[in-house]
Image (cartoon, helix red, strand yellow):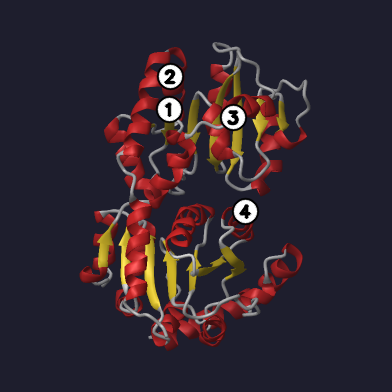
Amino acid sequence: MYLIYDLLYTIAFILLFPYLILRGLIGGHGILERLGKIPAPKDPGSHLIWFHASSVGEIKALAIILPKLSKVKPDLSFVVSVMTKTGKKQAQQSLPQADFIFYLPLDFPFLQKKIFRKLNPRLLGLVETELWPNLIRQAKIRKTKLCLINGRLSEKSFRRYLKLRSFFYLVLSCFDQFLMQSPEDAQKLWDLGGAKEKTKVVGNLKFDRTLLGINDPDKATLRKSLGLSSDDRLITAGSTHPDEEKIILSVYKRLKPEFKELVLLIAPRHLSRIGEIEELLLEQKLDFIRKSFKKKDDKPEVILLDTMGELEKLYSISEIAFVGGSLVPIGGHNILEPASYGVPTLFGPYMDNFKAAANLLLSAGGGIMVKDQEELYQKIYMLLENTNLRNQLGIKSKETLLSQTGTSDKTVQLLLDLLAQNEKK
């Protein structure tokens, strides 16, 4: 079955080759690294752990694991592979423990074999749902311990893998351990053929990660960076996608006459869409400015966040947060970030990627799900009117997160136990 996968992968690569080359040359997306040219590690072999994380969220999950591993076992060294340019930039900022960060080579057997020969890792940790068959198979062939960390399976991924269950049974059989976020994720894994005896449900690393935000940042400086006065009231719409900005702006325009001091911060999920959102704001005749262009005396109605790495802290000065990718069928984004600051957090019904977090906040009364534009308007209006309700939601959010901590400690210990099973001389 691997031969069929390799054939289909090769065909896809040939068809996409012109685009990949152009993207690599013009966009700086690491074409040489994707073809297997990576630096030599400082300490290959017995002390090296290789982690692979695709998205920014997965890299943030790693950011709480690596420091703890380094503290417990200072002799360990780390390398991290990523998939995207944004992911690499985030990893370089948040993973100083890594010897180096590189783009994962294409999933051809000869390329993966080359990387394993160069790194000779003691353990390979894949974060969430990064199931690359040849990467995984090479780990098994070389007797490298293989672990799925913070594992989850969205409904979309699960249905796709289920169609190829016999193949993914072979892939999953290569793993030594699965550390899953929830019982539901574990059950999906077992339905695909993952071994129950290799599975542990440890919780979601992102709960621990977001607790870093509970220590209040310098809110006065953050407000100053947006030009907010003491009377201004900030609503933040984070990680938004196409069509969601239209909904949010429509809601904002209805709220503004009632709440004159209201300021809206929009942070699109992809910064490449800033120009598109600017056109939309011009159509809506709203006064706006990009954050990076903001001057001291600017007082716009809408601020466009056009920088990376600031959204999480800016949630802390918001009265209300809406997290995008949830009013459109994307699967949602990290609602734990605003919730960790005690900010009332709203989101739409499409929360498959953060289903456990959404259910937890909803059951504890620390979050609000809205089904459409009208309900979003009604709930925000209600929260703006009721200070006590906002405070209650915030307290419940923090208490809920605190009740879920400890996943990172469990994960680190289980990784150390796995390493101890196969000491390399």
For discs 3 and 1, the disc positioned in front in the rendered view: 3
Q: Amino acid at mark 1?
A: Pro
Q: Which residue is mark 3?
A: 218
Residue 14 image point, x, y percent: 61, 80
Q: Are marks 3 and 2 in contact (CB under 8 Å)?
A: no
User: Residue, x 43% and y 35% (percent of image)?
Assistant: 340
User: Residue, x 45% and y 42% (percent of image)?
Assistant: 210
Q: Nearer the viewer, residue 85 or 150?
A: 150
For discs 2 and 1, the disc positioned in front in the rendered view: 1
* Left or right position of 293 against 254: right
Q: CA distance from mark 1 to mark 4?
A: 28 Å
For discs 3 and 2, the disc positioned in front in the rendered view: 3
- At mark 3, the secondary structure is loop
Q: Which residue is mark 2?
A: 383
Label of residue 93 in the image: 4
Q: CA distance from mark 2 to mark 4?
A: 35 Å
User: Residue, x 75% and y 30% (percent of image)?
Assistant: 294
Location of the N terminus by quadrant is bottom left
Query: Tag 4: Cα neighbours inside 10 Å, few (<14), some, or many (≥20)?
Result: few
Q: Are marks 2 and 1 in contact (CB under 8 Å)?
A: yes
Q: Amino acid at mark 3?
A: Asp
Q: Are marks 3 and 1 in contact (CB under 8 Å)?
A: no
Q: Which residue is mark 1?
A: 344
Label of residue 384 in the image: none
Disc on the earlier residue, 2 or 1: 1
Q: CA distance from mark 2 to mark 1?
A: 8 Å
* Left or right position of 273 against 151: right
Q: Amino acid at mark 2?
A: Leu
Disc on the earlier residue, 2 or 4: 4
